[in-house]
Amino acid sequence: MSGPTITPLATFGGGCFWCLDAALRQLNGVTGIACGYAGGQVEDPSYEAVCGGRTGHAEVVQVHFDPQVLPYRELLRAFFLIHDPTTPNRQGHDVGTQYRSILFAHGNAQLIEARRLLAEFGAAALWPDPVVTEVLETSDKGPVFWPAEDHHQNYFAHNPAQPYCQAVVAPKVAKLRKAMFDRTHRS
């Protein structure tokens, strides 16, 4: 007997969405990614408003994936691999509530799997500090996902020489490719 069906959509926030986007695109089974904003109180926020901390949104990615190729648990593992889930409202030099570690579970099966994995992380003491990732279940009323402006979509692929991409994004992509080599595209 199999468990509940996993919704093939995941929404994660863990720092700058350019990092999550670029790294998670490396995974076989990811069929699409959009950068955007979720978890706030303002409709259709702009990048400037979110970065100004005036909307309550986090920078997030919405990941469409094929659970037959990429199980949700493996997608979660990748998410936790490429950001620090122990720093509230910060990833490296990026500071503010828009950079918080947050996971929006699409359905009960995702919620159960996320909580199970976090419990395993806690038992294994993988990080020296406690995990502060917010785990929220989506509902018919939210979280509303607002796509980011076009120039933020697939940013790393369009701007690989940009200094932030070289210093911050590229190392996260390399880390994921090394740690999850068997699940990444071979180019």
Image (cartoon, rainbow, N blue to C red):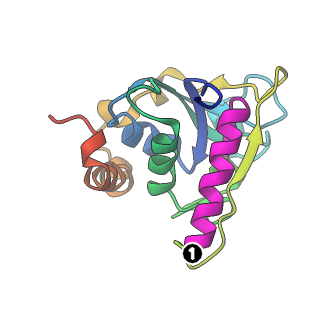
Q: Label 1 is placed on what type of residue?
A: Ala
Residue found 85% across the figure and 22% down from its top: 141
Please count the marks in the image. 1
127 or 156: nearer the viewer: 127
Is there any visible trace of residue 100 in the rendered image? no
The local crowd at label 1, few if under 14, some if 14 to 19, many if 20 or more residues have their Cα within 10 Å, is: few
Residue found 62% across the figure and 40% down from its top: 59
Q: Position of residue 144 (x, y in %)?
A: 75, 25
Instruction: Name the outermost residue toward the bottom.
Output: 128
Residue found 36% across the figure and 53% down from its top: 172
Residue found 25% across the figure and 47% down from its top: 181
Q: Quadrant of the C terminus?
A: top left
Q: Main secondary structure of the magenta part?
A: helix
Residue occupied by mark 1: 125
117 or 35: nearer the viewer: 117
Numbered range of the magenta stretch: 103-125
Q: Position of residue 43 (x, y in %)?
A: 80, 24
Q: Position of residue 118 (x, y in %)?
A: 63, 58
Q: Position of residue 40 (x, y in %)?
A: 79, 37
Q: Quadrant of residue 105?
A: top right
